[in-house]
Amino acid sequence: MEFIVRDAGPADGDGMMALMPRLADFDVPASRNPEDLYRDDAKLLQRWLDGAEDCLVQVAVTNENRVLGFTLVRLRPELLSHHPSAHLEAIAVDASAEGKGIAKALLDSAEEKARLSGALSMTLHVFASNARARKFYEHLGYDGELMRYIRHFV
């Protein structure tokens, strides 16, 4: 499958929004509503599309400009050191395009954009039960650094 990675624009909005549910396409913990996993990312993307949020947004598209995947990154200080950093808010690839190198190409491009913007690192969040994503990130050199625990009272 041929694709290119480029900066996203408003015309890519519908295609990116359609991929948001892919952020919950894994064994979501029973205590979680899958929509909660992408609702805020969708709102952030919409604010960016509306020009109200400063983000680095990349898309992978076919020659016909069909969106195959996207990344959504915000520049923000690293949690502990407060050094300039970037946070991968979302990365999603169409199910029909999995295994074609699109996620890696998108992440490589997002990292390069973040570096050029002054970031010294990139952080991301991933559910412990999302083994596929964890394996992908670890393969690309990301370290699992913090564990978040939760206890539900209901």
Image (cartoon, rainbow, N blue to C red):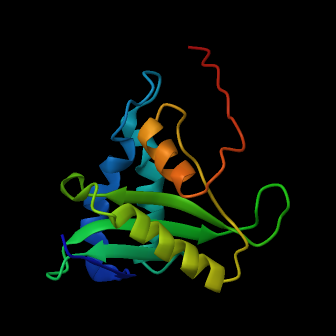
In the figure, residue 77 lies in which quadrant?
A: bottom right
Location of the C terminus (image quadrant): top right
In the figure, residue 28 lies in which quadrant?
A: top left
Residue 98 is situated, as x and y percent measured from the top left of the image, at 27, 55
- Relative to 103, does residue 51 appear above or below in the rendering? below
Q: How many numbered marks does the figure carry? A: 0
Residue name at image x 45 percent, y 43 percent: 37
**Along the line of sight, the residue nearer the viewer: 126 or 18:** 126
Q: Is residue 54 visible?
A: no
Residue name at image x 23 percent, y 52 percent: 95
Q: Which residue ends up furthest to the right in the rendered image?
A: 81
Location of the N terminus (image quadrant): bottom left
Residue 105 is situated, as x and y percent measured from the top left of the image, at 40, 70
Residue 50 is situated, as x and y percent measured from the top left of the image, at 41, 77
Q: Is residue 116 visible?
A: yes
- Relative to 60, does residue 131 appear above or below in the rendering? above
Q: Is residue 12 left or right of residue 107?
A: left
Q: Is residue 97 left or right of residue 7?
A: left
Residue name at image x 83 percent, y 64 percent: 82
- Relative to 150, does residue 69 appear above or below in the rendering? below
Residue name at image x 85 percent, y 61 percent: 81
**Along the line of sight, the residue nearer the viewer: 138 or 29:** 138
**Along the line of sight, the residue nearer the viewer: 41 or 91:** 91
In the figure, residue 93 lies in which quadrant?
A: bottom left
**Along the line of sight, the residue nearer the viewer: 118 or 3:** 3
Residue 3 is situated, as x and y percent measured from the top left of the image, at 25, 76
- Relative to 130, does residue 39 appear above or below in the rendering? below
